[in-house]
């Protein structure tokens, strides 16, 4: 379990990093929590690791009324313990709390896990659920890429060639809304067997106008499912969250693996949808009141 | 007093070193050594057609590449069958490097030696081995069907047919008021020590000697094996087990191919060579355990008393049988547990599959036996509508029945005769400890919270401390330091502390003055090894006897000096004194000096022992006939047969009927290992065992696919429980001393793991009302079970209320 030979560079500017990334087989290293095990198991053997940890300006969490912009070097732990970010978009802290274990959260980066595009990662789905985007820097310049255009397949994004995902932007939670996030995992901190993040939005009469969910470890890329029809126009107390769970079960197409059959994942989609929607609905009602 | 420490919860002396990174493991030894790495078979069953190493030889830093063709003499012969047995009629072992055919994924094919491990793995990547794939056998059922054979000369895949019986079981079943039959499975898991295997070998060309550090549970036997295989004289080979980061059984197997190949390379190359097993290698090339199919028929009377028990089992021994059939024998003989079974027959076929070898993992066949017996008890209770605790109680061997002869032959070739025990006492304590009688109340309370609560129990008897022997050496130096050594090895159990406690108590010296060394053939050449919960029983008693020898000699010398009668002397705090006469004393360190008559005064202490230092008795030789210089003693303990420890566990589970997650909310242990040297160490052993029991019941499995590929060969997908998955454990002790050894000890190392699968299966079954017939069980499998209309329903239990 020793990596194949690779080059290493630790540029001190984004331009330098992008130049280095133009070389064949160059790969970005940020927190290394997914990449380094792949290297050690020789499942990946990049020619050069371009370590961006010395690139300035990528380690900040910028919070505005519009949302939270998370720099490429922000560690999960930093986001987990960021009250301002949590106020604007509560899903960030709720989801990062489910990312692996403290040691991994202290090194692993939120943007790195998004760029890694693992469908069992929490933050890919949170980006999707919040309707977020990433900023992709290339030698030609920077541009925003919407989440739906970013995720292409498991461990695959639309970004090719020399590029650094410099930040991820998570839009603020809309008014009269609540969120919840919950996972079932085999062991605490494991990749979720199934996870669900949801938002519920109410109208001025405290009736549901939106109920949306995104799932972890379900599907090849993050998907956002609109469950509003099952609960539309109901107050939080009247809403049949179980019906929304049943609807969700019909919308997903999970795979089975060593730890869960596809049927079991589908069961969990329903259960977690019902549970999280109920909590998110209650939270939305509390905020509306 | 710091000397009377037997039975005290002394904090483990080794822990500061071990938990602050100052342990010295094989990988900490010999920086700068050449590194070995292995090309291993990617196929479960294949013929090797060609090995092309040409491209590999261009890699800068490659030193040597070995294949089977490079092995010579005994190294070119199959690895030993360590424990032959008359019923092991078709033993098969591999070669250090595969010869023609590979029999499991992970079998070593090529060894590369290079300047470091990175380079060695680069070299491995460039070695091209071509294979012709052969049909693969995975799982006991495929092995039984024998459509394909693992070994072409063993067409039925049966390595051994183990068979024992204590009477005419068919007649006894026919005469039984009730009988029932069922089939169940238990899956594979593995030891998974934090430190994998590791070997570091240095060949000393000047004196033609070999020193090997290896992460083993049996250094003396590794030494003998290396000497035999590499054709060296025994005294030219030293084997040291340094700090070992866990063993749990996998490191009792020896010689591992790497334990021979790395020294072979060190000799050939004249340079130190080192190999550290990585985790993937550990998964696919070490050892696993547990997989069995069990078909059980039991006869019983109206009261639930067993009248006959017939067990037909199939044990998956993997591709080879280097450790014989110890695991199925242990299953067969320990299955009966604490119960009086009037007529018992057991037949277990040990079968080959194209998978990693199966050798003892903590519990070593007992968890499977316990699973068979305890699930049988549950079924009898369900069938008769009786409380499960009550059925057990009615079948227990009674305190006045000891020694109790099961008329079976144990894994050490000796009769299964239980030395002592109080099983009803265990059950009483367990019922109280877990609140068995409150189960229905708790079930209702959990139901109100939307949870399905279940409770289960399991009892076991564990043969511990088998022979043939262990030895101990105790020596008091002129400095007052007390050196203790024994040949068996330590893997973190706390031997340094426990053995020091024994010596402190026996010899009357402060524990701070005692240094303990284990598993170093330079210090103690005769030993068997650390397995079968035997260290305290075997080495503990040997060391106690050695300390008693030292004490006797010290008192004899001191009696001369103090002009007192030996019987009037005592040793306390390292000082020999005349009882009741303060001032009439001599430090033990001075006795040590005087024990060695000297001509030369190399230091102040030595001066006291020189020939003009004081009045001597010139009518006697300085060293009496039959005596020896020095204050030291070697002694051995060799038991007539094993001691039998026992215990009872109970688990309370809560199941979420929406997600089918299984939460072990309570876990209670009552444990009897005879006299206890250190209760804190025993409790730690129990905690660790329970953690592995929970792992085996709910999380761990070896997920082989039909091609013999292990799908979960990493800690990401092989789910060892974290601390967050292991319940708090409450423990109660019962101490029923063994009459067989001087200290009254029984073993404690494996106990915690044995009943885990059985009692958690029982609890889950109790919670969901569906028959659990295969373990481990995960939430996804439980979901499949509860929604399967064909799944057998279990009558609702009324627990804690005798019918």
Image: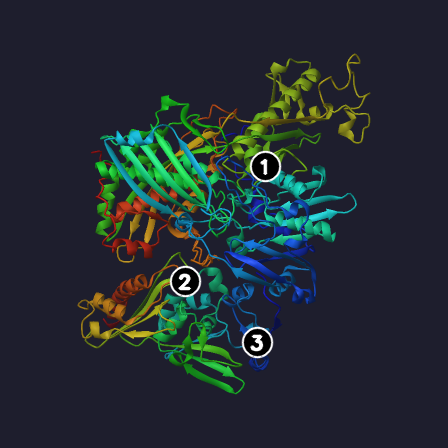
Nearer the N terminus, badge 2 or badge 3?
Answer: 3
Q: Chain of mark 3?
A: A
Say few, some or many: other residues with alpha carbon within 10 Å of mark 2 (under 14 / 14 to 19 / 20 or more).
many
Q: Which residue is mark 1?
A: B488
Residue at image position (70%, 56%) is B32
Whether residue B624 is situated above or below residue A245 in the rendered picture: above
Q: Between marks 1 and 3, how big is the CA–CA gap? A: 51 Å
Q: Which residue is mark 3?
A: A26
Front in this rendered view, residue A44 or A124? A44
Q: Between marks 2 and 3, how big is the CA–CA gap? A: 27 Å
Q: Which residue is mark 2?
A: A191
Front in this rendered view, residue B666 or B756? B756
Front in this rendered view, residue B214 or B41? B41
On-image quarter of the N terminus of chain B: top right
Which quadrant of the view contains residue B658?
bottom left
Residue B503 in the image, given as x and y percentages of width and height: 58, 29
Tag 2 secondary structure: loop
């Amino acid at each position: 379990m020793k990596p194949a030979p690779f080059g290493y560079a630790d540029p001190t500017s984004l331009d330098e990093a992008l130049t280095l990334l133009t070389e064949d087989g160059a790969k970005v290293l940020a927190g290394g929590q997914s990449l380094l095990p792949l290297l050690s198991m020789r499942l990946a053997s990049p020619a050069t690791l371009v370590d961006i940890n010395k690139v300035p300006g990528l380690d900040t969490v910028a919070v505005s009324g519009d949302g939270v912009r998370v720099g490429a070097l922000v560690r999960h732990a930093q986001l987990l313990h960021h009250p301002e970010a949590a106020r604007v978009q509560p899903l960030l802290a709720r989801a990062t709390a489910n990312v692996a274990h403290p040691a991994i959260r202290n090194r692993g980066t939120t943007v790195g896990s998004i760029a890694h595009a693992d469908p069992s990662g929490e933050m890919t789905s949170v980006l999707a659920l919040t309707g977020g985007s990433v900023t992709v820097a290339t030698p030609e310049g920077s541009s925003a890429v919407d989440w739906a255009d970013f995720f292409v397949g498991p461990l695959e994004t639309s970004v090719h060639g020399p590029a650094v995902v410099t930040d991820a932007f998570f839009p603020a939670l809309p008014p009269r809304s609540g969120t919840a996030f919950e996972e079932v995992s085999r062991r605490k901190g494991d990749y979720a067997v199934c996870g669900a993040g949801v938002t519920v939005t109410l109208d001025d009469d405290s009736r549901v106008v939106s109920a949306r969910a995104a799932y972890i470890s379900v599907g090849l890329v993050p998907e956002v499912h609109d469950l509003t029809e099952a609960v539309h126009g109901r107050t939080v107390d009247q809403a049949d969250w179980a019906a929304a769970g049943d609807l969700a079960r019909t919308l997903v197409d999970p795979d089975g693996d060593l730890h869960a059959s596809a049927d079991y994942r589908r069961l969990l989609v329903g259960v977690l949808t019902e549970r999280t929607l109920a909590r998110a609905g209650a939270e939305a009602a509390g905020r509306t009141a | 007093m710091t000397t009377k420490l037997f039975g005290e919860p002394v904090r483990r002396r080794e822990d500061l070193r071990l938990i602050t990174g100052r342990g010295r493991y094989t990988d900490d030894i010999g920086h700068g050594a050449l590194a070995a790495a292995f090309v291993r078979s990617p196929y479960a069953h294949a013929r090797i057609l060609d090995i092309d190493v040409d491209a590999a030889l261009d890699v800068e830093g490659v030193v040597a590449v070995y294949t089977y063709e490079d092995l010579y003499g005994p190294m070119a012969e199959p690895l030993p069958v360590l424990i032959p047995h008359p019923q092991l009629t078709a033993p098969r072992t591999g070669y250090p490097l595969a010869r023609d055919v590979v029999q499991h994924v992970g079998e070593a094919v090529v060894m590369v030696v290079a300047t470091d491990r990175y380079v060695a793995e680069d070299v491995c990547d460039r070695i091209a081995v071509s294979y012709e794939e052969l049909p693969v056998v995975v799982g006991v059922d495929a092995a039984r069907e024998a459509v394909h054979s693992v070994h072409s000369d063993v067409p039925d895949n049966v390595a051994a047919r183990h068979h024992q019986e204590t009477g005419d079981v068919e007649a006894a079943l026919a005469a039984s008021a009730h009988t029932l039959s069922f089939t169940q499975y238990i899956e594979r898991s593995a030891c998974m020590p934090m430190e994998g295997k590791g070997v570091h070998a240095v060949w000393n060309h000047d004196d033609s000697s070999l020193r090997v550090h290896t992460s083993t549970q049996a250094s003396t036997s590794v030494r003998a094996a290396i000497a035999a295989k590499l054709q060296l004289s025994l005294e030219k080979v030293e084997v040291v087990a340094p700090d070992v980061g866990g063993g749990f059984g996998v490191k009792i197997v020896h010689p591992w191919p790497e334990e021979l190949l790395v020294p072979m390379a060190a000799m050939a190359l004249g340079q130190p060579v080192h190999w550290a097993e990585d985790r993937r290698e550990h998964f696919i090339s070490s050892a696993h355990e547990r997989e069995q199919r069990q078909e059980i028929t039991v006869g019983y009377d109206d009261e639930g008393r067993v009248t006959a028990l017939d067990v037909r089992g199939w044990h998956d021994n993997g591709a080879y049988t280097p450790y014989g059939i110890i695991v199925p024998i242990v299953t067969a003989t320990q299955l009966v547990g604490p119960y009086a079974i009037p007529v018992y027959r057991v037949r277990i076929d040990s079968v080959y599959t194209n998978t990693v070898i199966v050798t003892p993992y903590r519990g070593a066949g007992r968890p499977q036996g316990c699973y068979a017996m305890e699930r049988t008890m549950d079924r009898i209770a369900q069938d008769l509508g009786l409380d499960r605790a009550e059925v057990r109680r009615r079948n227990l061997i009674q305190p006045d029945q000891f020694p109790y002869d099961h008329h079976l032959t144990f894994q050490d070739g000796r009769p299964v005769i239980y030395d002592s025990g109080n099983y009803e006492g265990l059950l009483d304590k367990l019922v109280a400890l877990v609140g068995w009688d409150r189960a229905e109340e708790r079930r209702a309370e959990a139901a109100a919270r939307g949870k399905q609560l279940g409770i289960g129990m399991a009892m076991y008897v564990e043969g511990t401390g088998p022979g043939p022997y262990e030895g101990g050496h105790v020596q008091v130096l002129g400095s007052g330091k007390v050196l203790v050594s024994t040949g068996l090895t330590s893997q973190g159990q706390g031997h340094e502390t426990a053995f020091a406690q024994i010596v402190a108590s026996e010899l009357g010296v402060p524990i701070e003055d005692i240094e303990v060394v284990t598993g170093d053939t330079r210090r103690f050449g005769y030993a068997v090894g650390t397995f079968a919960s035997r260290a305290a029983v075997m080495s503990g008693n040997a060391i106690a006897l050695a300390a008693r020898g030292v004490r006797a000699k010290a008192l004899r010398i001191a009696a001369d000096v103090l002009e007192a009668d030996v019987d009037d002397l005592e040793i306390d705090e390292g000082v020999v004194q005349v009882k009741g006469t303060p001032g009439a004393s001599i430090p033990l360190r001075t006795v040590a000096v005087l024990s060695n008559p000297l001509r030369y005064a190399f230091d102040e202490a030595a001066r006291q022992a020189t020939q003009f230092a004081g009045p001597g008795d010139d009518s006697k030789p300085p060293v009496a006939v039959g005596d020896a210089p020095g204050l030291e003693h070697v002694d051995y303990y060799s038991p007539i047969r094993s001691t039998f420890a026992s215990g009872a566990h109970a688990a309370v589970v809560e199941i979420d009927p929406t997600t089918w997650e299984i939460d072990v909310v309570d876990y209670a242990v009552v444990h009897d290992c005879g006299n206890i040297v250190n209760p804190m160490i025993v409790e730690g052993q129990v905690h660790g065992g329970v953690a592995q029991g929970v792992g085996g019941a709910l999380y761990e499995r070896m997920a082989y696919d039909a091609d013999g590929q292990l799908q979960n060969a990493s800690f990401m997908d092989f789910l060892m429980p974290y601390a967050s998955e292991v319940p708090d454990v409450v423990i109660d002790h019962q101490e029923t001393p063994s009459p067989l050894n001087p200290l009254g000890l029984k073993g404690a190392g494996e106990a915690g793991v044995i009943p885990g699968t059985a009692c958690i299966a029982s609890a889950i079954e109790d919670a969901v009302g569906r028959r659990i017939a295969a373990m481990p069980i995960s939430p996804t499998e439980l979901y499949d079970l509860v929604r399967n209309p064909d799944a057998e329903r279990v009558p609702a239990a009324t627990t804690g209320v005798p019918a």
